[in-house]
Image (spheres, rainbow, N blue to C red):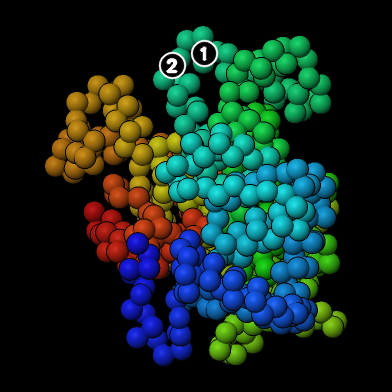
Amino acid sequence: EIFDKVKDFASEIPTLKQIYLIEETGENTMAGLEKKGAGNPVPSRKPKHSDVAVLIYTSGTTGEPKGVLLSHGNLAENVKGALSWFLNLTEKSRCISMLPWAHSFGITADLHAFILRGGSIGIMGSVETLIDDLPKIQPSFMTTVPRIFNRVYNGVWAKMREEGGLKLKLFEAALAAAKSKRETGNAGLKYKILDKIVLKKIRARFGGCLENAVTGSAPMNVEIAKFFIDVGIPTYDAYGLSETSPAITINSPLMGNRLGSVGKPIVKTKVVIDRSRTGESGDDGEIICFGPQCMIGYHKKPDKTQEVIVEMNGMRGVRTGDRGRLDDDGFLYITGRFKEEYKLANGKYIHPDAVELEMKVLPWILNAVVSGAGHEYNVGLIVPDMKLLQHLATELNLSVKPEDLFDPANPAGQSFKDLLTAEVQNHLKKTLGSYEIPRKFAFILDDFTLDNGMLTQTMKLKRGVVMEKYGTMLEDLYKE
């Protein structure tokens, strides 16, 4: 099937000499190559530490993707540094691989880590088959993005509230007992009983053997992280980027798991906070990573390479373009992205990703975008979970079809939209400043996905692509 799509590439690409099939037999197949090689063995050629290992293109969330050149030394040092804090990852460990190996997060955290430790890897079929794949693979480790856990969290709570009665009471009692265990360290008889009859079932959704989950691409919501710790699946936020192979900091069983942070710098890594862009009076600034994982440079882009590579006291570093702070114990907190920040007409700076992450904590919000550069206030775009909203509409006795819920010509739909807007704003008031909270929202039914090009392989928003399609809709909110 794939061969039929690419078989004519050789006539279009002068440098392409041959296409080989993996699963067939014959001359132009993997089996044919192996047979040919067996008949003419040659010594293996070991790469140098500085030799280029991979060319990985950045996700291009805010601009043109760039080809990141990573050496064998970059990748080897990064995986060794990260693994030194996960001593329970052994040859008996198994992971479910759901991140693409063409991305630095997947190639390092899944492929290289488990090859180095001698563990096994089960490969997810697709996002749609994940629920079925987990019990088949029964992973003890998982490297993923917070969105997976957010959906499980929202799904579990939605099911419990829908069933109500005794099941809901047992669920809440189990979480209360687990919270007490987390805070006191004491597991009483009540917890042990409720763990077996309630929490064990949630762990079973992940295969029943999951010990650790490392999450990246965005910080995990603290309340959701506490929920999974209480369930018995601790999650460890990590931080990095393609240019650093990717790991810079990780929360871990060995060095501590400080919720809300993205952990401490891994072995041989130093993080410096550059306040030249934010002012010396504040405690945050641009994150600069120094260490052996820092890239060779961008492929055929020397000017772009020069913009981000820095030298300090003989150390090679990379400017991340992210904004953060270090606490007194060396844990790093992400406070925004310089590339995405913008200024309102009143001079206040907005980090839209922080607002969007908080909005998506609400179970009925699948995705969100915030905009407002140069305006007096922010506006937002929401992709709702229509199944959950239909259930809510039924509870409110709104006899309206899901697709008509946000029809401005429908009085019931407009009332429902106003109700949801108020809920989002009240939720955001708990953690954000009033100037950060969007005053108006537009609702769309089509989610942002990999297939429509609005998400990267690690589920990050491609802001430019989204704004190209929906920017006019957001601007129109200011005219209402």
The percent coordinates of residue 98 (x first, y second) are 54, 51
At 59% from the left and 28% from the top, the residue drawn is 204
What mark, if any, has residue 267 been given in the picture?
A: none
Amino acid type, residue under disc 1 in the picture: Lys
Q: Describe the element under mark 1 as helix, strand or loop.
A: helix
The percent coordinates of residue 334 (x first, y second) are 65, 57
In the current view of this chain or complex, which residue is farthest to the front?
Answer: 39
The percent coordinates of residue 163 (x first, y second) are 43, 16
* Label pair 1/2, CB-CB below 8 angstroms: yes
Q: Residues within 10 Å of mark 1 (few under 14, many from 20)?
A: some
Spatial separation of the CA atoms under disc 1 and disc 2:
7 Å
Of the pair 117 and 475, the residue shown nearer to us? 117
In the rendered structure, the answer to whether residue 315 lies left or right of residue 474 reads: right
Q: State whether residue 237 is above or below residue 306.
A: above
Of the pair 6 and 243, the residue shown nearer to us? 6
Q: State whether residue 199 is above or below residue 386.
A: above
Amino acid type, residue under disc 2 in the picture: Glu
Residue highlighted by disc 2: 163
Q: On the image, which quarter does residue 35 sit in?
A: bottom right
At 57% from the left and 62% from the top, the residue drawn is 101
At 81% from the left and 26% from the top, the residue drawn is 185
In the rendered structure, the answer to whether residue 251 lies left or right of residue 337 reads: right
Q: State whether residue 90 is above or below residue 168.
A: below
Residue highlighted by disc 1: 167
Q: Describe the element under mark 2 as helix, strand or loop.
A: helix
The percent coordinates of residue 325 (x first, y second) are 71, 60
Looking at the image, how many numbered discs can be counted on the residues?
Answer: 2
